[in-house]
Amino acid sequence: MISRNERRIKPRRLQKYRRIPSDSTIALFGILFTAAYNELWQTDFTYLKVVHWGWYYLSTVMDDFSRYIIAWQLCRTMKAEDVKNTLDRAIIETGVEHVQVV
C-alpha cells in the first residue's frame, strides 16, 4: 500500500533551456552566455580530507559552454601556484593562445 506522502511526490521535469547567469556575471564578463568552446573557463579549488593521509586540494578548470573539465590537479597545499599550474595545464591541453584572467 502506498502512503499519502509517496503519492504526493511528483517527478522533476528536465530543464529545456540553459541557465542564464546572474547579473553580476553579466556585468563582470560583459556577455549573457557563452556560445562556443573556450570563451569562458571556471575554476574551482575544493578541499578533501583523506583518512590517515590528511588534507588534499583539488584544483579544476571547467569550460563554461561544454561543462567539460579541461584540467585538474590534486595538490598537497592551497597556494596560488597550484591554481596557476592547473591553468597552465588547461592552456596546453586546449592550445589556446590568448588568455585573459579576470
Image: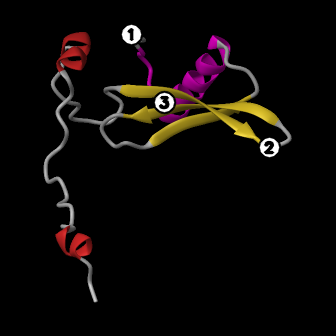
Q: Quadrant of residue 74?
A: top right
Residue 84 belongs to magenta span: yes
Q: CA distance from mark 3 to mark 1?
A: 19 Å
Q: Earlier in the sequence, mark 3 or mark 1?
A: 3
SS at badge 1: loop
Residue bearing the label numbered 3:
95
Q: Residue at (66%, 20%) from the top-left corner? A: 82
Which residue is tagged 1? 102
Which residue is drawn at the image coordinates 60% and 26% (left, top)?
A: 86
Q: CA distance from mark 1 to mark 2?
A: 36 Å
Residue 97 in the image, given as x and y percentages of width and height = 44, 20
Circle 1/circle 2 CB separation < 8 Å: no
* Residue 93, numbered circle: none
Quarter of the image where the N terminus is located:
bottom left
Q: Range of the magenta residues?
A: 80-99
Q: Amino acid at mark 3?
A: Gly
Q: Residue at x 48, y 41 (%)?
A: 69
